[in-house]
Amino acid sequence: MRYLPSVAIRLFLCMGAATSLSIGAQTVPTSVDPYLWLEDVQGDRALAWARERNAQSQSALEALPGFAQTRAKLLEVLDNRDQIPYITRRGEHVWNFWKDATNKRGLWRRTTLAEYRKPQPQWETLLDLDALAKNENENWVWAGANCLAPAYTHCLVSLSRGGADATVLREFDLATHAFVVNDGFTLPEAKSQMDWVDANTVLISTDFGPGSMTKSGYARIVKQWKRGTPLADARTVFEGREADVSAFAQVDRTPGYERVVVGRSTDFFNSEQFLVQGKALKRLDKPSDANLMWQRDWAFLQLRSDYTVGGTTYKAGALLGIKFDAWLKGDRHFDVLFEPTATRSIARGGISMTRDHLLLSILDNVAGRVEELSYQKGQWARRAVDAPFPGTLSVGGLHDPFVKNDPLANSYMLNYADFMTPDSLYLGQADSDKRELLKSRPRFYDADGMRAEQQFATSKDGTEIPYFVVWPKGAKADGSNPTILYGYGGYQISELPRYSGEYGVAWHAKGGVLVVANIRGGGEFGPTWHTSATKANKQRSYDDFAAVAEDLIARKITSPKHLGIFGGSNGGLLVGAVMVQRPELFGAVVCAVPLLDMRRYHMLLAGNSWMAEYGDPDIAEEWAWISKYSPYQNVKAGVHYPKVLFTTSTRDDRVHPAHARKMVARMLEQGHKDVLYYENMEGGHGGAADNSQRAQLQALRFAFLWDALGRQ
């Protein structure tokens, strides 16, 4: 399956003090931000401030009873050697990247499927990141590899310093297990993409110098680069616009169906795409917000909004299929491969292919199902796959079009998990419900006596909002349960049942309840569930989250002094906004790698690319709605807020660490005393660069929550 994302994640730092707002011909003064100096990511003053806050938070939290034991248990879960080594199939091998206590930065490795079936497979190590980092004196973090078919002996390896989105790209030769030094494809640290055209040609988008980047800080130019020639001589294939989010390219080298598609992301959810025909470009006629995919002679459109063409209207969330060449020639008679309902949608990333089948991961009232479609005798046949229920299912085809008579042509991997069932990975076969269990994740805690249930809360506008409650053994609805309410509510990302050994050993085993909210802005019920809480309607996400909290209290699952909320990134904005709006509902808040200053978010790092979600604060009408929930602008002195822990990363080059820094500085200035802050100096947007850092970060969060919410 070939899929062109509407946005590639890249980096751009656009700083400067915005002290006025233009409205038409007028310039309206705004209050001066006294904490702009905290936007200097690596500035000595800002880092000294962060280290001082770190020391205070660590001193307070690490001294709490059980901290060291919890951290040790978390690290044991993360480093467990019986975790499932998830794989990517390339040719005769399956490939994996692996971390454990011995290999903290990780091993890139491969083996055969026959060997993978064994309880303890023998792996061929391709690259030892710990050894590489030591030899080169770099804090390398693995960021993926793109290998050239059919031999798969040359790969474009991406390495990140400290976990940032920006990477160094280096060509790796598997025959020698070494990087190609002479005439190798190499790019310095940047937000780059590179794809093979052939053994001596690549398409790249990167920072080519002044004028080559968009306002969002992503590459706007795609070039073709020949081996052995200077990067400066690379030929321009496509240019986007400065106002775009990014430009992109993808090469499909499937024998007999070779295609190159380039395009521009006009915002986070919309794009224009073009088929490269020699030196000409043919615009692909699709709705700008539809996801375009293809496989051999078929094109597929996944709709985000209603699409009317040829006298027919197709619903938002539908999946359409058509022969690729017929579509290019103007045919618009689509086959409807999936039509959503009020409670059924295709999961995000839930479309996969074998050679002859389309596999759909479907959310049915936030529970996973799988459907299998095949084109037979001029029409599509549909079959429901008998798979575990009602947790989370994901599938991925294994077909490699470069393998002749591919024995895995119609095989796929299927993974299942729910809140109390560890992940199980199966090898499935299309046209059959037979499955072979390949690997299963160990149980990290005793789930006997635990239970999970789905409940519904009524939001402010009457909309029913589903949420999951995971009860520890022996818990009763008496209002005394320490409870974490987690949410995200943005970018059509769904929060689904999953097994967490970390929550098991650090929360459930000690009597804590976990609640996962499926608020609007997410994708649990398809694209309309998302778009109903964007831009002018973003407040609905916060109303939904507060409604779930109120419902938990009304059902006596917990009470305000025992209820904590946790969210990261957009979820950090969520918990920040709800904390400011409804502080009386909560006893504690953990706000991770958050957006918080929504007046300047579009000026910081990748923030400009997210205006399709939130709006443009430089437009008076849009700032009017953003300003009502922006946490940094709405936090006040004299209000009793819950205890709060903010966490971020210096190396987060996606969401600027200044959001958390400035919020903490402002709250301390206002006299709020129950405010803690922790900034990991590595880690990127994930907050941690390795398992040791991740265990430390999680232990701090759990210690904070138990101290704030535990039964007093």
Image (tube, rainbow, N blue to C red):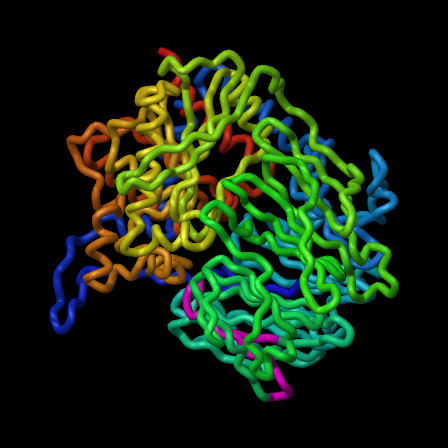
Task: Identify which residue, 481 or 347, lies in the foreground.
Answer: 347
Q: Is residue 684 above or below residue 198?
A: above
Tell me: 231 left or right of 91: left
In reply to whether residue 277 is colored magenta, the answer given is yes
Residue at figure coordinates x 13%, y 67% from the top left:
27
Is any part of residue 593 visible from this angle?
no
Tell me: 699 left or right of 531: right
Q: Is residue 422 above or below residue 473?
A: below
Residue 388, by quadrant, is top right
Residue at figure coordinates x 40%, y 58% from the top left:
605
Residue 300, by quadrant, is bottom right
Please, what is the dominant secondary structure of the magenta stretch?
A: strand
Tell me: 393 left or right of 19: right
Tell me where residue 364 appears, x and y as whole percent. Answer: 54, 43
Q: How many marks?
A: 0
Tell me where residue 347 appears, x and y as whole percent. Answer: 55, 49
Quarter of the image that includes the N terminus: bottom right
Is any part of residue 650 visible from this angle?
yes
In reply to whether residue 75 is colored magenta, the answer given is no
Residue 275, by quadrant, is bottom right
Task: Identify which residue, 530 or 231, lies in the foreground.
Answer: 530
Quarter of the image that includes the C terminus: top left
Tell me: 459 left or right of 272: left
Tell me where residue 558 appears, x and y as whole percent. Answer: 37, 20
Q: Is residue 559 above or below residue 226?
A: above
Residue at figure coordinates x 63%, y 32% from the top left:
78
Tell me where residue 437 appears, x and y as whole percent. Answer: 78, 37
Please state the extent of the stretch shown in magenta in the rendering: 261-279
